[in-house]
Amino acid sequence: MNPKFNKKILAIAGIVIILTLTLIIINSTRNDQADNNKIARNNGQQEAVNIEDEPTNAVIEPTNEPEPSITSEVIVKEIVELSVEEDIPSLYEVYSAYFPIGAALEPFQTTGLKADLLKKHVNWIVAENAMKPVSLQPTEGNFNWTQADQLIEFAKANNMEVRFHTLVWHTQVGDWFFKDLEGKSMVDETDTDKREANKQLLLERLATHVRTIVSRYKDDIKSWDVVNEVIEPADPDGMRASEWYKITGTDYIETAFRVAREAGGPDIKLYINDYGTDDVVKRDRLYELVKEMIEKDVPIDGVGHQTHINIEWPPVGSIIASMEKFAGLGLDNLVTELDMSLYVWNDRSDFGEEIPYQIVEKQADRYAELFEAFKEHKDIIGGVVFWGIADDHTWLSTFPITRTEAPFLFDKQLHAKPAFWALVDPATR
Ligand code: GLA
């Protein structure tokens, strides 16, 4: 065979082998990269996200587009460690000339980073669950103080005040309250005399619950939610058709306030707490009830406005208008459970992992507007309490559906969001 021809074949074969090897190496590098990305994501550590989509099994139609080069940008996203930023202003100090700033917490949050965040930014705390009826008296006569005491100790050790939430509610309350002496459900009773006896029994149980708790904590807690969510415009009379109401009418409200005052003395402040108090129909029904109670000398000191709002609704003006209306009765107003959902009512969408920047900014603007109004009305607002502190822990992430939520001023890493800066430095908005 012609040696020249031989050399040519060898040269071509060599080039083919080199090309094949190069392709194999390129391919394996790309697969390694994809695997590494997945591992990093699963570990929740530093995340390297290739701007191409992850490989799929879908058939890819040939196009004229050039293949993106494997050296094309790889965006490295830092997944920042949880930490408390010590070099930023303290929220409650910034607001000290206006009103105290509070947050709801669980007992497990009294240690660690969450505790540090709370200590820096709030001077008021409230139990998210630990002081609800079922937590304190799960079965008749068996009071469980451990978790509530833990919160009080935490507050004392850190110069914070405590709010009490809540002596009476229609949910998170032991069933035993509403069973007669034979264990039968009181609401099902049809005999008039027995209904009356049941009513007295329920009011006695309520009085014992209230007296026992208020006597224990009256020196540690000044601000008390006595009843929670008793108004429901859709129910008969606009009063929530709870077991409390069906069995006692509005007597349970009266009893709870009177016994709280007797046990706690004149210095504790007693509140009626509800959500949607900006809604004109609900607000006016609540107003009517409170006015009627005050005329009967029921000791009500103020209205707690839960203020679970969203990024669009309600208008700040209607929140303030409601407070002004109750202030007209000589009552204090508290914002008791503030959070701001990213979704409007009835929206069931989910931002997933990436909350759009415009939404985060919109939330900041709305928080700024809200707190400017609160500051202007500081004379009728006794305090502002958030229903949590950072986006890693909020009831909204499972209500009304499970999804990404971010209702607070601090993100999941406990770092200040634009909403925080909107409140401590509103001039920048
Ligand atoms: C109501 C209650 C709170 C809390 C929230 C949701 O607002 O008052 O105690 O349960 O619902 O978590």
Image (spheres, rainbow, N blue to C red):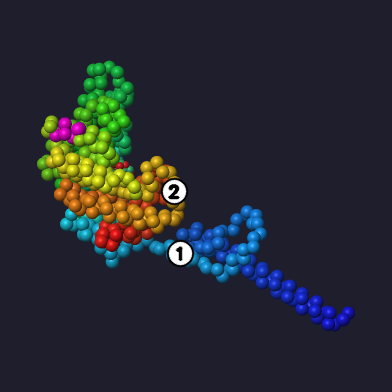
The residues tagged by marks 1 and 2 sit, at their Cα atoms, a distance apart of 22 Å
Q: Which quadrant of the picture is home to ligand 1?
A: top left
- Residue occupying image coordinates x 30% and y 20%: 189
The residue singled out by tag 1 in the image is: 77
Membership of 61 in magenta stretch: no
Q: Residue at x 29, y 18 (%)?
A: 190
Label 2 beta carbon less than 8 Å to ligand 1: no
Q: Earlier in the sequence, mark 1 or mark 2?
A: 1
Relative to the observer, which residue lies in front, 234 or 197?
234
Residue 291 inside the magenta-drawn segment: yes
Q: Quadrant of the C terminus?
A: bottom left
Badge count? 2
**Which element carries disc 2, helix, strand or loop?**
loop
- Residue type (three-letter) at the residue carrying disc 2: Asp
Q: Nearer the viewer, residue 419 or 398?
A: 419
Residue drawn at x 18%, y 43% as measured from the top left: 324
Residue range corresponding to the magenta coloring: 288-294
Q: Is residue 169 above or below residue 53?
A: above
| Location of mark 2 (residue) | 350
